[in-house]
Amino acid sequence: MKFDEFLKSLSKIKNIPLPAESSHFKMVPPFRRELLKLQSEAIKQAKHAGVVALFYPNKEEQTKFVLILRNTYNGVHSAQIGFPGGKLEPQDKSLQHAAIRETFEEIGVPMHEIKILRELSQVYIPPSNFYVFPFLGIVYHPPVFKKQEDEVKAVIEVDLQDFLDNNMLITRKVKTSYSVAVEVPAFLLNGHVVWGATAMMLSEIKDLIRQIV
């Protein structure tokens, strides 16, 4: 989809009610649905983080958004696909500021070039005890990505049309943080299997965009 067409459609997105759990639950295994209902107390003690689902045009004016592949390290999110973003720090004015700051640090997009259109539904991540606040943002021109070498292994540029294709929805057996292999719904994007919290956020974004394009 051409980016100028996408921008015209985005003018409607602020007024659409967020689908939240109805979208999130499409991308979680059945046992996780039950766990989510029991996590209200854990969320009160969770650390907060902000991430950005950042859309932009490529050089051919086609609409893309960016994901990152995290480096391998000793942690629960090692070698996983996610949105750029990170933990709320004391110097951050807000979760939105944290999301934009971390996006700049991780992939090099200048903070002043990122326009946030709206906040999306929050997602709690039990293994790391993070409550993640996603934001939908845009950049009006093709970004020049510069990855943070110690955090980011690869920058993944996903075509909007591919993302909206239902053939990109798959089921895969993955090893969870609890060392148990389970069948999970996932997105197959640029050859990468995207599941868990990132897939839940992507599901809401997809459902929102489907209503406006």
Image (spheres, helix red, strand yellow):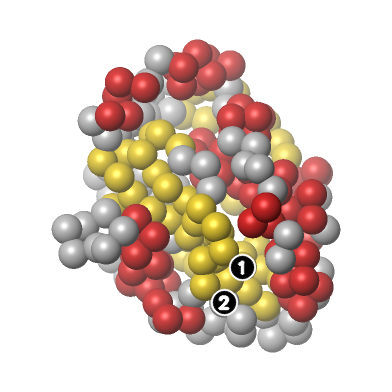
Q: Position of residue 168 (x, y in %)?
A: 74, 46
* Mark carried by residue 39: none
Relative vertical location of residue 120 with respect to residue 62 in this rendering, above or below: above
**Who's the residue at 52% across and 30% down the image?**
174
The answer to which of marks 1 and 2 sits earlier in the sequence is 1
What's the distance in space between the residues labelled 1 and 2, CA to CA? 6 Å
Residue beneath disc 2: 139
- Quarter holding the N terminus is bottom right
Snapshot quadrant of residue 110: bottom left
Res 188 seen here: no
Q: Which residue is mark 1?
A: 55
Asked if the residue at tag 2 contacts the one at tag 1, i.e. Cβ–Cβ closer than 8 Å, the answer is: yes
Closest to the observer: 164 or 157?
164
**Left or right, 1 with reference to 184:** right
Residue that sits furthest to the left in the current view? 90
Q: Residue at x 42, y 72 (%)?
A: 107
Residue 4, by quadrant, is bottom right
Q: SS at mark 1?
A: strand
Which residue is rendered at x = 52% and y = 72% of the image? Answer: 115
Q: Amino acid at mark 1?
A: Phe
Residue 116 location, x and y as percent?
A: 51, 66
As drawn, 172 above or below 166:
above
Give whichever of 113, 118 is nearer the camera. Answer: 118
